[in-house]
Image (cartoon, rainbow, N blue to C red):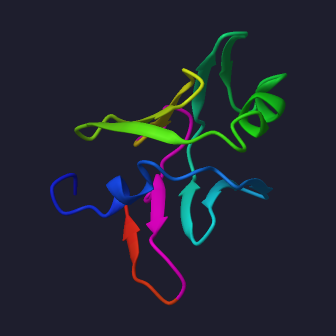
Amino acid sequence: MAKDTKLFEVISEQLSAVSFVHDYIELVFYEKTIRVFTAPFLKNTEGEYKYPQAGSRDALCSLIGKTVVSINILGGERVELYFSGGEALAIPLSSENQEIIEAMHYVSGQNQPIEVW
């Protein structure tokens, strides 16, 4: 998936919303969306947070208004997004607590195909 992905389109994009849905999280970059079905891990200047642990929702929301400066895809292990404030968000592509079929979706815009990770 890494070679063919459109995910790199979110580099230089500002995070406009974080939505917490029943069993997933959406990271919205205006028309682009990353849908996360695993438990993301955030490191920032205040600490480290693994969703859904205490403080993780506020920590994820603190990314709103920040810009993605780079993305690192580590094989089938995880996707890392680095933000303008020095934050690092790791999205696991597998889960130790449950069997998952899909770890993440990327949608590049309205009526665009979904990339499934």
81 on left or right of 1:
right
- Going 45% across and 64% down the picture, which residue do you hit? 106
103 on left or right of 4:
right
12 on left or right of 43:
left
- Going 83% across and 31% down the picture, which residue do you hit? 58
Quarter location, residue 16:
bottom right
93, above or below 30, in the image: above
Whole-percent x, y for residue 11 in the image: 41, 48
79 on left or right of 110:
left
Whole-percent x, y for residue 9 in the image: 37, 59
- Is residue 101 part of the magenta span, yes or no? yes
Whole-percent x, y for residue 51 in the image: 69, 32
Quarter location, residue 33:
bottom right
Q: Nearer the viewer, residue 1 or 68?
A: 68
Residue 48 visible, this orientation: yes
15, above or below 5, in the image: above
Quarter location, residue 59:
top right
Q: Nearer the viewer, residue 79 or 94?
A: 79
- Is residue 18 part of the magenta span, yes or no? no
Secondary structure mostly taken by the magenta-highlighted segment of the chain: loop
Q: Quadrant of the C terminus?
A: bottom left
39, above or below 101, in the image: above
Q: Nearer the viewer, residue 31 or 111?
A: 31
Q: Which residues are magenta?
A: 94-110
- Going 50% across and 90% down the picture, which residue do you hit? 111
Q: How many labels sit on residues?
A: 0
* Outermost residue to the left: 3
Whole-percent x, y for residue 48 in the image: 65, 14
Q: Quadrant of the N terminus?
A: bottom left
107, above or below 111, in the image: above
Residue 117 visible, this orientation: no
